């Protein structure tokens, strides 16, 4: 027998109960806007060029561009298109980029937990230290926003074997780390209660595509358009979730932003009465009410 995670059982998509999103809509679309900060001279981080001995000024400053310029440019685009998003926020960002997370919150966007910084992975830590990481990040988001975050995306999609348990015990309702489905999936935890896995993309995600696979903004936008068209047609048969994962230091550059705008306008033009542009937390809320 293969080792198993014990979090959920196999469920073929065509065999599941039918349901709809609010107002009878069939395709839920959300933007996952990653707002991240990094350590200077140490720690992890995506690389524009092969890393060099620290301090790696080239790659650090490239990532910092996202907070100083790119994310603001993307926020203006979302405003112009009247699109909500889920801001996935490193808690240290409030000190490292004052006003950035607040600007997304001010437009009504959901603020979800995303660890303390993307210079570390929580899955590398002993259980007690991982629990401290979750508690520290959660406390800071609560202090800054006045509400408890409902959702969590681990820095670098990193989980230990007990991460879902720790998140559920810390009061989280959903997590975004698992990319196993196009519908929400209930996951078991050691408390006997469940936490919801809301689909988060690793294909429609600018880091794997642009950094790892060396695709450019035009190709990434074409992927978004193609996925949307297929999922929109399929949603007549079954409800689906389409997430798009974005970072300011990638899609916030001018030569890529124009293609992101093209993709988002395509989606809006064809949405009709079928598409629900929303946030990950709202998907969690609605699915929980269905009682499935």
Image: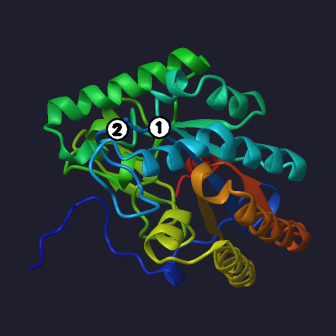
Q: Residues within 10 Å of mark 2 (few under 14, many from 20)?
A: many
Q: Secondary structure at mark 2?
A: helix
Q: Which mark is residue 57?
A: none
Q: Residue at x 72, y 41 (%)?
A: 72
- Using the image, tell me which numbered label, if any, was put on residue 167: 2
User: Residue, x 62% and y 75% (percent of image)?
Assistant: 216
Using the rendered view, name the quadrant where residue 250 is placed. bottom right
Determine whether 210 is above or below 73 in the image. below
How many C-alpha atoms fall within 10 Å of the one at disc 1: few (<14), some, or many (≥20)? many
Q: Secondary structure at mark 1?
A: loop
Disc 2 or 1, which lies upstream in sequence? Answer: 1
Which residue is situated farthest in the left direction here? 1
> As drawn, is 194 to the left or to the right of 130?
right
x%, y% of residue 76?
Answer: 82, 44
- Looking at the figure, which quarter contains the N terminus? bottom left
Residue at horizontal 67 percent and vertical 44 percent from the top? 71
Residue 105 rendering spot, x and y as whole percentages: 69, 30
Q: Quadrant of residue 239?
A: bottom right
For label 1, the residue is: 37
């Amino acid at each position: 027998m293969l080792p198993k995670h014990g979090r959920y059982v196999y469920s073929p998509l065509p065999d599941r109960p039918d349901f709809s999103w609010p107002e009878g809509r069939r395709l839920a679309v959300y933007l996952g806007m990653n707002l991240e900060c990094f350590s200077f001279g140490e720690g992890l981080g995506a690389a524009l060029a092969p890393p060099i001995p620290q301090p790696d000024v080239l790659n650090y400053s490239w990532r910092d561009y996202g907070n100083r310029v790119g994310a603001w440019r993307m926020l203006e685009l979302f405003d112009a298109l009247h699109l909500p998003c889920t801001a996935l926020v490193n808690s240290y960002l409030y000190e490292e980029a004052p006003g950035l997370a607040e600007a997304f919150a001010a437009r009504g966007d959901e603020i979800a937990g995303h660890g303390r910084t993307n210079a570390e992975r929580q899955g590398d830590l002993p259980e007690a230290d991982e629990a401290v990481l979750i508690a520290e990040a959660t406390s800071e988001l609560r202090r800054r926003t006045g509400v408890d975050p409902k959702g969590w995306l681990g820095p670098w999609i990193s989980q230990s074997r007990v991460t879902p348990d720790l998140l559920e015990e810390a009061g989280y309702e959903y997590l975004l780390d698992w990319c196993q489905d196009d519908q929400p999936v209930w996951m078991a935890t050691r408390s006997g209660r469940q936490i919801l896995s809301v689909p988060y993309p690793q294909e429609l995600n600018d880091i794997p595509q642009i950094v790892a696979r060396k695709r450019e903004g035009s190709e990434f936008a074409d992927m978004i358009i193609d996925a949307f068209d297929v999922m929109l047609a399929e949603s007549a048969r079954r409800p689906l979730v389409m997430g798009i994962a974005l970072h300011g230091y990638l899609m916030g550059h001018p030569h890529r932003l124009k293609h992101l705008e093209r993709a988002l306008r395509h989606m809006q033009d064809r949405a009709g009465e079928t598409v629900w542009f929303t946030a990950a937390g709202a998907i969690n809320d609605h699915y929980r009410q269905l009682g499935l």
